[in-house]
Amino acid sequence: MRTHRNLFWIVLMACLNAGCVAGSGTASDTLPPVQRDAQGNPTPPVARQEVFVVKSPHGERMDEYYWLRDDHPKAKRAEVMNHLRAEQAYTEAMLARLQPLQDALVKEIRARIQEDDSTAPQHDRGWWYWVTYRTGQEHPVYMRRQGGASGPERAAPERVMIDANELAKGHDYFRVSAVVVSPDGNLVAWTQDTQGRRTHELLVRDLRSGEIVDRVPGALESVVWANDGRTLFYLRQDPQLLQSGPVCRHELGTPVSQDTIVFDEPDKTLTTRIDATASRAWLTIQTEGYNENELRLVPLADPSAKPVIALPKVAGVRNYADHLDGKWVIRTNQQARNFRLALVPEEAFSNVAAWKDVVAHRTDAAVDGFALFKQGIAVSERADANPRVRVIPWSGGLGRVVPVQESAYSMALGDNPDPSNPFVRVGFTSMITPRTVIDVNLASGEQTVRKVQPVLGYDRNQYETIRQWAPSRDGKRIPVSISWRKDAWKRDGSRPILIEGYGSYGYPSDAAFDLAGVSLMDRGFALATAHVRGGADLGQDWYEDGRLLNKRNTFNDFVDATDFLVREKWADPKRVFASGGSAGGLLMGAVANMAGDRYRGLGVHVPFVDALTTMLDASIPLTTNEWTQWGNPIESKEAYAYILSYSPYDNLQAKAYPAMLVTTGVWDSQVGYFEPAKYVARLRRLKTDSNPLLLHVNMAAGHGGKSGRFERLAQVAREQAFFLDLAGIDR
């Protein structure tokens, strides 16, 4: 699983002189007229071809659309923006006749949302915190109220900490990331992104006066307070790679230029993360790749102390540690493919020989994570492609598993900031069960439902879900989760289906409720998730068998799952649709090349489709720290040849392809807009069919698309209208 006012004018004038145009993509952007044929039908833009040779130690390739790439962080060349706007104008013209259906879908989906809604409050150090949404507003409001672990004080007023709607004014894109309150409860720090490129500003507000008392530009999402309540640790963003730069220390009220660099990882194949331990005694600085990591510690009581390596790098070993009451708990894969949990007193932390298992390694279940409490340890584990939560005592043992009645579901540890709480917060959902927040008593196991996602007009009893197992071509069993509406769908091989997949980075594709997906089920679609290799849905072996030189298993699994669903009459073979984003977009691109004839239409979102060129360029964000995921084609001829064998852009052919809706964002920091733009240009030239090929360009967003909760509805409704039309459903 891509300014200072004077500086602004300098950059703007330089761009104007170089022929650049701003790419802000506001509502006032004017799209060019669409060219039409003799019958009045829109004709797609044709990107010019320009010879560019992509060189590498292992071969050369010609990329005729390389010119579409522009790395400028503020604006793109006029020629590039003109082409992107022409693509967007063509897409809008092609979809214009579906606008009434799209509008109806947006209205329908929005009608299921309880607009005036809040998250379940969570207790932390004398306060209850929650997030609320108000009717008609796009962004959250962060709230709190005083009270003990048993509940808020009756007389305590509700207080607004951050109103993201106010902060978002004047921005086409806005998102709040980390929100962290100081130890004394008087200050709140948060990070906000106004472009969609993970370039955040860190702000601090005094909750007594309401005034913003400090700002730090150029940060990433994470923030940690030191115990003095006036020192903050944060990550600077690498200005070129847009990923983690140095860990810095900032004292409130001092110039940012005086901030101390606490640690800077020189190896750019690694990612740096910061966090506070459950005890709030330590700042953890974790540098991590996909094969190994290293842990450094700084005492939060002495923020000026130098970081000390607590767990050094060991090839092939990944350790994740947390601290409470003088003990460390470590999730480790050392001699444990699926991870185990070990316990050690803090004085012996670095002595691996002193680690004692509290959850031993198992081949039939994987340990995914944990949360520490004074009364026990909550463990997130995975078995049979389903995540579950187990609560165990500090002494170890089996403890108890939080029971679940469904065959395909998602259960995860929620936000558990205060280890003195007598309960662990758990989130539960399935493809037909809205998201549910549960508090599980650590001593008794008693469950208290704190919140069920309101879905207006939805009756869960009208829907069904099931887990199936599809055979792979090499003898594996691929989990497939399926849901449908009972009175609108039958398993007779005549109904449409939408299959989603991802299969990368070890991220599982757990079965979860899709509020918008109800609209498709109501119209006779089944929804399916293929839990393909490359995710850790079935543990670490499932992940390892879908990365590096095993990556093609991801694509084969998706095709094999599709064939199974058709063969077993879960789907009409002429109305099979599939969708995936980012690395899931790579999956869609590879499947279109390998087995495009199986699909009527594909949703290919912010897709990583030019894999080889990107992995050959260390200047592109995320490339260096993803070599351990895809392979390093600069150093390895074998990796070069293998990536070349599946890279969607490199394997486009002169043949028929399914209908495609491809999406991108101009400011995408994770998959450059130029990848899907080049992909569409080349595919449009080569394909032999008349199926629609559309590129929707979001001029004002990045990898995640629109930031507002209602703005996002247009994105999903657009894809749904596209698929419904192809399926012959016009309502």
Image (cartoon, grey):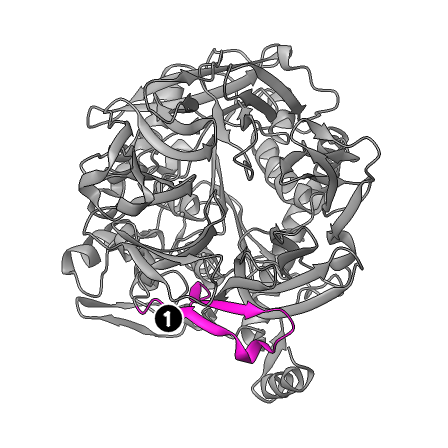
Based on the picture, tell me whether residue 253 belongs to the magenta stretch.
yes
Badge 1 crowding class, 10 Å Cα cut-off, few under 14, some 14 to 19, many 20 or more, is few
Amino acid type at image mark 1: Ser
Find residue 628 and report its horizontal and vertical position in percent: 26, 53
Q: Residue at x 47, y 74 (%)?
A: 260
Find residue 341 and report its horizontal and vertical position in percent: 31, 33
Regarding residue 530, the answer to whether it shows in the image is no
Q: Is residue 461 above or below residue 559?
A: above
Quadrant of the snapshot with the C terminus: top right
> In the rendered image, which residue does mark 1 sit on?
619
Between residue 691 and residue 496, name the one nearer to us. Answer: 496
Q: Is residue 364 above or below residue 709?
A: above
Left of 538 or right of it: where is 702? Answer: right
Q: Residue at x 60, y 89 (%)?
A: 17
Regarding residue 400, the answer to whether it shows in the image is yes
Between residue 528 and residue 422, name the one nearer to us. Answer: 422
Between residue 687 and residue 417, name the one nearer to us. Answer: 417
Find residue 302 and report its horizontal and vertical position in percent: 47, 62
Q: Residue at x 33, y 34 (%)?
A: 536
Q: Which residues are magenta?
A: 240-266
Q: Is residue 181 above or below residue 20?
A: above
Q: Is residue 17 above or below residue 721?
A: below
Which quarter of the picture shows residue 49? bottom left
Based on the picture, tell me whether residue 219 belongs to the magenta stretch.
no
Between residue 626 and residue 451, name the one nearer to us. Answer: 451
Element at label 1: loop
Which quarter of the picture shows residue 588? top left
Find residue 533 and report its horizontal and vertical position in percent: 30, 35
Left of 262 or right of it: where is 550? Answer: left
Q: Residue at x 70, y 39 (%)?
A: 102
